[in-house]
Image (cartoon, rainbow, N blue to C red):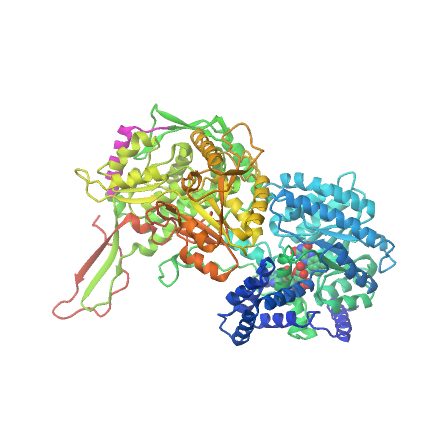
Amino acid sequence: MRSLQTEIEQRGARIFELVDRHPEPLFSKAGFYQRLMALSMRDERFKVQMFRFVDVLPSLRRSGDIVQHLDEYFTDMRNGLAPLVRTGVRAAKIVPWISGRLLRWNVSGMARQFIAGKNPDDVMKTLRKRHEQKIGFTVDLLGEAVVSEKETDEYAARCLELLEHLARETDGWSDQLDDSAELFPVVNLSVKISALYSQTNPADPADAIAHLAPKLRPILRRAKELGVFINFDMESFSHKNITLDLFKTLFAEPEFRDWPHAGIVIQAYLRDAEKDLVDLIDWGRARRTRFTVRLVKGAYWDYEKIKSTQNGWSIPVYLQKPESDVNFEALSRVLLENESIVTAAFGSHNVRSIAHAQALADELGIDRTRFEFQLLYGMAGPVKRALVEMGYRVREYCPVGELLPGMSYLVRRLLENTSNEGFLRAKFSDNVSEKILLRDPNGLVRGNPDSVSKDRHLLDGASLDVPPGDVYENAPLVNFAYQQSQEEMRAALRQVRARLGKKYPLVIGGERVWIDRTTASLNPSAPDEIVGDVAAAGIPEAERAVKTARDAFAKWSWTPFEERARLLERAAAIMERRRYELSALEVFEVGKPWAEADSDIREAMDFCLFYAQQMRRIGRPRLTQHVPGEESYYHYWPRGVALVIAPWNFPIAILCGMASAALVTGNTVIMKPAEQSAVCGAMLMEIFEEAGVPPGVLNFLPGHGSVIGAHLVDHKDVDLIAFTGSREVGLKIWESAGITRPGQRELKRVVCEMGGKNAVIIDSDADLDEAIVDSIYSAFGYQGQKCSALSRLIVLEENYDRVLERLLSAAASLRVGNPEEPGMTVGPVIDKTAYERILNYIEIGKSEATLAFQHQNVPAKGYFIPPTIFVDVKPNMRIVREEIFGPVLSVLKARDLDEAVKIANGTDYALTAGFFSRSPANIERAKAEIEAGNVYINRSCTGAVVGRHPFGGFKMSGGGTKAGGEDYLLQFLLPRVVTENITRHGFAPEETPLYRDEFRVRG
Ligand SMILES: Cc1cc2nc3c(=O)[nH]c(=O)nc-3n(C[C@H](O)[C@H](O)[C@H](O)COP(=O)(O)OP(=O)(O)OC[C@H]3O[C@@H](n4cnc5c(N)ncnc54)[C@H](O)[C@@H]3O)c2cc1C
């Protein structure tokens, strides 16, 4: 008997022979497209610019804009293509209206390469042609990015229309092969699940299924009546479990249980694909009806890798291409060995993968009519033809729709076709030999495939050649797409709920101080629920805390920085251990949705770990200059007693960030949390105590700002005040700290971060799918209570109507409710005062501008404010000038970018800002001109990450410090230089070390 490999090679050779009989370039349409692809494969930078240009083109309406973008994208290219491109651009500028049209026509042609038709009528032409060629079809409706329920309803309606149309138009068509035709209905529709519910949250599969199932049932019902096959496509990893659960839920329902014409996709590039497939097969056996699995490698490889790396998640896809190939073959075996319950559809253009499936089927005695090959429209035409000639069933995946909604599909195809790793490029463009193409992928996997470089962990941060943020690897976020994470969070919520109402003391000098005066911290979702009763310090306790901190200072300031850094690292490790519990507490105490709470804990951990690393970077005295005969070392001393006053909106992160910076630099600390989040503060104190902070070094002093705030700020023994909070309080502190009191040793240092009135500008060429989703999130995520939140959306006139229409329906789709439920975007505002203040601003807005939208579905109990949008807003109105700190968004119209930037900058604040555009020139301008401490381009303006986005603003937003940045610790330190003449009688050592040990007192 011949080996499987020999069989594969033989079959592969046969396919290649048939392919070569009809030689065809990689891309069936020659001309413009082919030339662009060839250039892209030669030059990575050109490829990036080209894909970006293609991406923006459909949204450009005027020829002049097209030529302008062409110029911006390509004229500064410095490579062999530059002269060619420059000549093209120059020519285009001379007659823009012709060149604009020509370009659009060419790019549409490029899209037509992959999009089988603009509408159901149009696609029928292609399907008829294919039918004659004995190639079947599955049709996919383009339009993946839905931002609102209105758009999902439209998608569902279009699916139904398409079903009817296809069934009608193919009446009388028969299957390409006579045998096993009952398994393969002629009409086959591929459905994108993400397009049917705009609020899918991976943390809440039950909610997603509850919304998706009712949208799908009418489609499935009609498909069943019409004898149509329905396939659930698979998209990004975050949607995977929901899609699988939805499939199993729907097709187990009595109505659909006996229906065999349903299929789903398994992506072999996922590490957990085999487990999912085996689970599906078990489910299918229990259901006792056939179903289909389309096996593919997966279309979102780059996206998954980027997203996971950004969030610190384990990467769900294999990292080596041959691993995906090996897994594809392993899963092909699982499918074929279970042929009695599952029909296999192999979705691949790779001749090796295809030949393997064929050879394996033969080995297992499975007739070739009982499975099929599926290939994409516009790709690998000769392979399709070869497979038909060999007597296999072939189905083509045919996207239908306009270019604009189809853009992400087009870009995925362009990426796939130009990928260095891809089969199609290797075979049809790089002419790699058959022998190499048919190699067993098992032999190509390099050793230790799972090892992801951890080099950054190994760096001690002492190198000055590497950006400080870059030697730091952030703590990961919890990925709520995993069921286990969801269960742990639920368990933590139960556990924390059980201890609501506990009492919490002050902690001074390591002692628990119980006093009669307490403040009840309430759950803003249910204000009758007391989260905790926290002691409220008065003047005597404040005095005691200052004295204790002052007494502890000398010893702590001489403690080696390494020991202080380790304290922070131990605290971070404890937070990691108690992570879900801390997140759950934030849900109850400050109304944070799950993911927001988790990212607060992540940020707190990051502050500890980043500042520990930064302290190691600056802790050792450093030589100022190499000068013979003298050495001067620059180093730092702590300032003394630090008073940390924190807000409630990032109740653990900001408190921890300021306190840990003060501690690691050798200051002793009085930590005053906000009254509304004092239990979170008590938890942080507990964590530092467990981590081993010495008594008196960190003191926990909750209390009312009005009682102890001014006393502490003005205290002669407080040397530094780290404050984050409102402008009103911040400015008072700034002013008061400038007064020197009798007995005061140091000039007080104030680290001050205040609010913002943040703007986002949407340019006329912006990608609205992204701009809308990110603006909605920036404005309404955590109820608009982040200091970075968007409150002024400035839209260029040209785009205004389109943006507004989508924005309002996206806001109407938001989930508002108790954040104990997973997947809520908008919860309650923090307390009654905030509630009343925001409602008052809404009334002011109604009198000044036009109320365009107010959410209807808001719980009656709790401090829930409906997300609200105002239009017809002018820059001088109060709702645009004053900080509201709630879910209220003003939309302003701007004539052009000049006016938009002027409006954005026309505020007292300068914290965050955003800009959505695809014009390189405008992006450069925004980068240069927008006045904000953190400017974000083409992404949301909230969610700064420690080390990556050092955070903080200027003007009335703050004193210019950057939390989580390389300069931050310097605020907590006094620089000092020690110079020694090291010459003795004309003799001096030749070398002076760059760093030396810390200066130490004799102990
Ligand atoms: C009919 C059809 C329907 C499809 N439906 C879906 C769908 O619903 N969902 C979906 O996600 N995909 C789907 N795809 C798959 C996807 O769009 C690609 O076409 C497919 O992954 C290309 O694989 P290949 O075997 O043709 O080519 P090959 O060139 O052999 O494989 C390329 C693939 O290998 C993987 N890869 C590339 N680099 C690496 C690396 N460094 N490490 C690990 N893996 C790597 C990627 O998945 C890449 O797409 C479908 C494909 C077809 C043909």
> In this orientation, which residue lies closer to the viewer: 455 or 50?
50
> In this orientation, which residue lies closer to the viewer: 728 or 370?
728
Residue at coordinates 36% horizontally, 42% vertically from top-left?
Answer: 754
- The picture places residue 380, in percent across and down from the top left corner, at 72, 67
- Residue 17 visible in the snapshot: yes
The image quarter containing residue 15 is bottom right
Is residue 548 one of those drawn in magenta?
yes
Which SS type dominates the magenta stretch? Answer: helix
Quarter of the image where ligand 1 sits: bottom right
The image quarter containing residue 721 is top left
> What range of the chain is rendered magenta?
535-553
Q: Most extreme residue toward the top, as rendered?
A: 516
- The picture places residue 365, in percent across and down from the top left corner, at 82, 60
- The picture places residue 467, in percent across and down from the top left corner, at 39, 60
Image quadrant occupied by the N terminus: bottom right
Is residue 560 one of those drawn in magenta?
no
Does residue 786 lie above or below 520 as drawn?
below
The image quarter containing residue 726 is top left
- The picture places residue 226, in percent across and down from the top left corner, at 82, 47
